[in-house]
Image (spheres, rainbow, N blue to C red):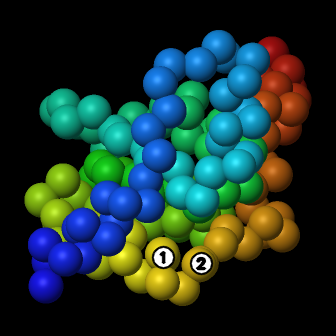
Amino acid sequence: TLKTKFELLNSRFTYIPTVPHSMINKYQKNADLLLLVIPDTPNNSGILTGKLFEYLGSENLIMNIGPKNGDAAEIIDHCNAGKTFERSERREIIEYLNKLILNKKTFTKSNPNIKKYSRIVQAHQILELI
């Protein structure tokens, strides 16, 4: 049942309180799944957070809660880096998490599409524009 699955998921999560910024990359790289939440605001489909690019750099799986037709969802899909859910898809989110736990799905680290979203590549693109 849904409640049983949620209880299983809840036993698998670790809450990590605020840590110094210098340690964030360590936690991101060691995570099984990273949660990205796009703010629920008008026109949020164009929001790209800095966190998205940090998460891509960690080469870990991303679960995005936000607009499925948004720019963040498109990048995550293009990089095969995870999955996007609308806020209303609670059952689907729980089923996805349960599936990840049971199958131990990992991120495809060799995806070349990720490299174009790295800070170095983006800095070079900005430099070329200037």
- The residue at the point 43 percent across, 61 percent down is 12
Is residue 76 placed above or below 102 in the rendered structure?
above
Please tell me in which quadrant of the rendered image residue 106 appears: bottom right
Q: Position of residue 19 (x, y in %)?
A: 59, 19
Please tell me in which quadrant of the rendered image residue 130 appears: top right
| Secondary structure at numbered mark 1 | helix
The amino acid on which the numbered mark 2 sits, given as a three-letter code, is Lys
Q: How many marks?
A: 2
**Residue 48 falls left or right of residue 115:** left
Q: Position of residue 127 (x, y in %)?
A: 85, 21
**One can see residue 58 in this view:** no
**Residue 101 falls left or right of residue 65:** right
Q: CA distance from mark 1 to mark 2?
A: 5 Å
- 98 or 58: which is nearer to us? 98
The amino acid on which the numbered mark 1 sits, given as a three-letter code, is Leu
- The residue at the point 67 percent across, 28 percent down is 24
**Residue 20 falls left or right of residue 100:** right
Q: Which mark, by number, is residue 76?
A: none
- Mark 1 and mark 2 lie on one chain; the one further toward the N terminus is 1
**Residue 37 falls left or right of residue 130:** left
Q: Position of residue 46 (x, y in %)?
A: 38, 39
- 1 or 65: which is nearer to us? 1
On the image, numbered disc 2 is attached to which residue? 105
Please tell me in which quadrant of the rendered image residue 41 appears: top left
On the image, numbered disc 1 is attached to which residue? 100
Is residue 45 placed above or below 97 in the rendered structure?
above
- The residue at the point 37 percent across, 60 percent down is 11
| Secondary structure at numbered mark 2 | loop
Instruction: Determine contact: label 1, label 2, CB under 8 Å.
Output: yes
Q: Residues within 10 Å of mark 2 (few under 14, many from 20)?
A: few
